[in-house]
Amino acid sequence: MLFRKAKISDIETIHKFINYFAEKDLMLARSRSSLYESVREFTVAELDGKIVGAGSLHVLWEDLAEIRSLAVDERYQKQGIGRGLVKAFLAEAVNLEIARVFALTYQAPFFIKCGFNIIPKEDLPQKVWKECINCPKFPQCDEVAVIKELDL
């Protein structure tokens, strides 16, 4: 399994993954334009030349980053790919000297297995007032906030 930074040529596959799961209400949809704009934040999991998972690490503040749009092809789930992507994002956060990484998710048990803890969304004002306020689900967000404190 190869974990690498995404390229422009990966965006259509990433878009397909994210919006497939969004249609099932398992994550929020993302537009192609937002994916192209944030391509440098994305990491993909590649197996035998095929992208089987993807996600991004988005920096919000000097000590806070968010794992976003984490998706693994259903045929490859339960094989450690999602966990491998999270591990890559945590290593990237350490390299950037970011002390806290969070996610807003419908998959809290997965993140708990990766060492995250559930917190109130109100503990993330940078996220809530900068980005969540523009979400169609705001203020009735049903995602769960999870966070991991990193040793720097």
Image (cartoon, rainbow, N blue to C red):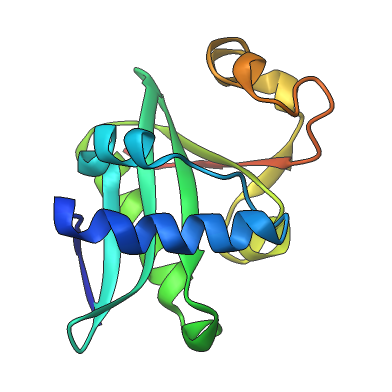
Q: Is residue 97 visible?
A: yes
> What's the residue at 54%, 55% (across, down)?
19
Of 146 and 97, the residue lying toward us:
146
Q: In which quadrant of the rendered image does the C terminus lie? A: top left
Residue drawn at point x = 16 percent, y = 50 percent: 8
Q: Quadrant of the N terminus?
A: bottom left
In the displayed structure, 140 sits above or below 91; it is above
Name the outermost residue toward the right.
140
- x and y percent of residue 22 in the render? 63, 54
Looking at the image, residue 142 sits to the left or right of residue 106; the answer is right
68 left or right, relative to 123: left
Pinpoint residue 52: horizontal percent, then vertical percent. Answer: 36, 76
Residue that sits furthest to the top in the current view:
129
Identified at 33% across, 34% down, the residue is 33
- Compared with 80, 60 (above or below) is above
Residue 105 percent location from the top left of the image? 66, 48
Q: How many marks?
A: 0
The quadrant holding residue 29 is top right
Name the one closer to the observer, 116 or 8: 8
Q: Identify whether 120 is placed above or below 46.
A: above
Query: Which residue is more in the foreground, 42 or 136?
Result: 136
Give the image quarter of residue 62: top left
Eyeballing the image, is 125 above or below 36? above
147 lies left or right of 145: left
Q: Position of residue 136 (x, y in %)?
A: 70, 26
Residue 7 can be seen in this image: no
